[in-house]
Amino acid sequence: MISSHIVSDLEKLCDYIAFLHKGKLLLFEEKDVLTQEYGIIHGSANMISAIRTEAVIGKKQTPYGIEAIVKRSAIPTNTEISPVSIEELFVFMVKGVK
């Protein structure tokens, strides 16, 4: 078992990742499943608002539009989804606006 705030180390060393925030277990999953299950969509506010709300983990405004972390399984297959790092996923889970 490893406990660390350096997520890049966890990505390199661990097979399973548990994420605790303020005493609550937010997720416990196999690392490879996390990167396969979630992704980032970049788009306009209209495009992101058209996505089912249960598919969106978090979103934030950037100078180039909106960035949203989504569950890949709930997104239409023709949508372009970028890979997400474990660190990005954690940040969105804690700070991303829903």
Image (cartoon, helix red, strand yellow):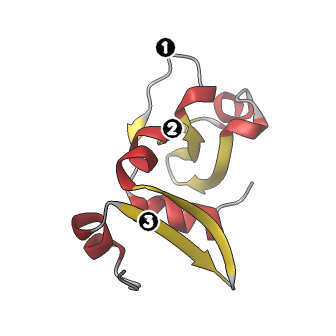
Residue to which mark 2 is pinned: 41
Q: Reply above or below: 78 against 72.
A: above
Q: Is residue 79 above or below residue 43?
A: above
Q: Amino acid at mark 1?
A: Asn
Residue at the spot 36% in from the left edge and 74% down from the top edge: 7
Ranked by sequence position, the earlier of labels 2 and 3 is: 3
The reply to whether callout 1 and callout 3 are in contact (CB within 8 Å) is no
- How far across and down, in percent of the image, does residue 54 sit? 75, 39
Is 98 on the left-hand or right-hand side of 2?
Answer: right
Local crowd size for mark 2, using a 10 Å CA cut-off: few (<14), some (14–19), many (≥20): many
Q: Is residue 27 above or below residue 81?
A: below
Disc 1 crowd, CA 10 A, few/some/many (<14, 14-19, 20+): few
Q: Amino acid at mark 2?
A: Ile
How many numbered discs sit on the rendered protein?
A: 3
Q: Where is residue 19 drawn, in percent x and y? A: 54, 71
Q: Are marks 2 and 3 in contact (CB under 8 Å)?
A: no
In the image, farthest residue toward the left: 12
Q: Nearer the viewer, residue 69 or 43?
A: 69
Say which residue label 3 marks: 17
Q: Residue at x 57, y 28 (%)?
A: 73
Which residue is disc 1 drawn over? Answer: 78
Q: Element type at marker 1? A: loop
Report how far apart the C-alphas of labels 1 and 3 lie in the structure: 30 Å
Viewer-closest of 7 and 49? 7
Mark nearer the N terminus (2 vs 1): 2
